[in-house]
Amino acid sequence: MRLVVDLNRCQGYAQCAFLAHDVFTMHGDEALLYNPQADAGQREQLRRAAAACPVQAILVEGLDETAGAHPAHGEEASRGR
Amino acid sequence: MDGDRQLEWLRREGRIVIVGASLAGLRAAETLREEGFAGSLTLIGDEPYEPYDRPPLSKQVLLGKAAADRTALPRRRDPDAQWRLGVAATGLDMAARRVQLADGDEVAYDRLLIATGVRPRPWPNQSEAELDGVFVLRTRDEAARLHSRLAQGPRRVLVIGAGFTGSEIASACRERGIAVTVAERAAAPLVGALGGVIGDVAAQMQREQGVDLRCGVMVTSLEGDSAGRVRSAHLSDGAAVEADIVVVSLGATRNTEWLARSGLGAGPRGIACDAGCRAFDIRGIVTDDVFVAGDVARSPHPLFGYQFLSLEHWGNAVSQAEIAAHNMVSAGADRRPHMWVPAFWSSQFGVNIKSVGVPSMGEEILISQGALAERRFTGVYGYQGRVIGAVTFDNARWLPFYQRQIESTAPFPPPFPTLDMRSDGQRPLPADFPDPSVPTHGPTVTLGGYSPADRRMVFTPGR
Ligand SMILES: Cc1cc2nc3c(=O)[nH]c(=O)nc-3n(C[C@H](O)[C@H](O)[C@H](O)COP(=O)(O)OP(=O)(O)OC[C@H]3O[C@@H](n4cnc5c(N)ncnc54)[C@H](O)[C@@H]3O)c2cc1C
Ligand code: SF4
């Protein structure tokens, strides 16, 4: 599963690192590092992390097995401006 | 055909071609489909890979926390496109509306989006640049090669240029316990983008983390051994540095050469376009079927005096691609301007650096929160009495506030007291940007119009 975090939007609340610590880790106090390609086994964790991100900065492809390419979340950057 | 009918036809069965299959190209393709474009869509990219994300290349990948070949970008939806990957566009015939490809093929379009980005400025001496162990970092392949070399435990890495990418590479080396020297022509790291006050903080940070930082010097030559492997570098101050990896990180050049004879207003500083992402031709007349987005574009921004801004920022590529795609299939009145407030992030030496606005336009800086010495602060940049940009070191949650200040052209210095204001922040300091006539590796924002040196037209006055 591919993912990307819009780090302009990310506020470093570490919510994702708490919920999916195999994918997201904090680097120092505020910087977020993540693995851009997670294993299928991490789907449930990822789903929760993406949903819990308070600024919806996490875009994941293939979260929803049935729909394949439809991301769960993530407006990414400035939609609707 | 009248305009409405033509647009309807375009949306139903027109041909749209996107050159540059990376972040901007992919997000534009997805947006076109979201907007209901049902015609044929072709994405042309010279890299053999589907679009991938570059920011992790100098961070996660070099730290060994993600593999370079696993950074493909997630899709928002299926762009339902024909992919022509691994083949470069080599020319554009605007009159015939065709893109020429390196394999001799031609692709016809009704609307074209150019999103060819930038590439690293190479080491100027070609035979030195070809030495084994000399790297630049822009692509997935380059990141993979550099990572595997770092994994072999080099004795020392030399990074030439302390902009964001160079500093991130140095940071990754230190985190992996590798000795690293950074050589920077300017007085401090990051000065091109953030000025000397912040540059000093970045310099201290690097030195504390064990980087052998040399500022105010240039690397004059690289030397190899008999097997063609790089061994050392000579500096303008007479010193020599022994290194078995050299990363050249001297900023970027726009990928516009393929447009040289097209008649498009494209040069080494990018492709000029209007606020709606429509490209200008060489005569300064806006085209109606050629659009640009991402790092390769230069567009006027009302918040910054309508100067033509060229940004090498991830968020800008996404936002401009969305606007370009929307405008490509919309009628005049429905078109939207690209008015993204510049924003980017970097992380190095365990510190989260973020910025909004255009700090490099700033004349003065005020540390409005935190303290420089703690590496946790907010710096606000002022230009002609208004707030023009802001930077944070481990203080990102304040940035949205300063973004609104920039958008509303709030006065500088800010008339209100701020939370956590220390002695640093009592009054504005000169932001201390280097003399712009002395180029460094360059900030990731370029201001100003065309360089007269780009001269490609002959002006023939009437008699
Ligand atoms: C190592 C690194 C770290 C970065 N870190 C950050 C960061 O922390 N924060 C941030 O905001 N930004 C960062 N960036 C910048 C960000 O990645 C770019 O702004 C973004 O990639 C721009 O996207 P783009 O699609 O406009 O251009 P690019 O990603 O450059 O894509 C252009 C594509 O077009 C292709 N191309 C070029 N010429 C042709 C041709 N003639 N025919 C066909 N294809 C062609 C290129 O090969 C490339 O694949 C970083 C960049 C790098 C390299
Ligand atoms: S939950 Fe969202 S805001 Fe918080 S660290 Fe993760 S991505 Fe950033």
Image (cartoon, coloured by chain):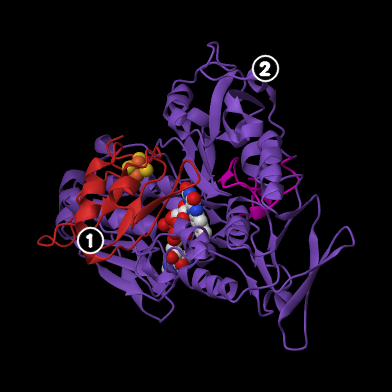
Chain colours: A red, B purple
Q: Secondary structure beneath disc 1? A: loop
Answer yes or no: is residue B305 visible. Answer: no
Q: Which residue is mark 1?
A: B79
Residue B212, position as x, y percentages in the image: 75, 56
Query: Which residue is at the front of the view, B429 or B209?
Result: B209
Q: Are marks 2 and 1 on the same chain?
A: yes
**Above/below status of B425 relative to B85:** above
As for residue B417 lying within the magenta part, the answer is no
Q: Sequence-wise, which precedes: disc 2 or disc 1?
A: 1
Q: Are marks 2 and 1 in contact (CB under 8 Å)?
A: no
Q: Amino acid at mark 2?
A: Arg
How packed mark 2 is, by other alpha carbons closer than 10 Å (few <14, some 14-19, many 20 or more), is: few
Residue B292, position as x, y percentages in the image: 41, 52
Residue B385, position as x, y percentages in the image: 60, 17
Q: Report in which chain the residue with disc 2 lies.
A: B
Question: What is the magenta range?
Answer: B435-463
- In the image, is B377 to the left or to the right of B248? left
- In the image, is B278 to the left or to the right of B239? left
Rendered residue at 67%/52% (across/down): B162
How packed mark 1 is, by other alpha carbons closer than 10 Å (few <14, some 14-19, many 20 or more), is: many
Q: Which of the 4 image quadrants contains residue B424?
A: top right
**Above/below status of B384 relative to B185:** above
Mark 2 or 1, which is nearer the eye? 2
Q: Which of the 4 image quadrants contains residue B373?
A: top right
**Above/below status of B168 relative to B274:** below
Q: Residue furthest left?
A: A66
Rounded to the nearest angstrom, the CA distance separating label 2 from label 1 is 51 Å
Q: Tell me the tag on residue B166.
A: none
Q: Tell me the tag on residue B427.
A: 2
Query: Which residue is at the front of the view, B273 or B254?
Result: B254
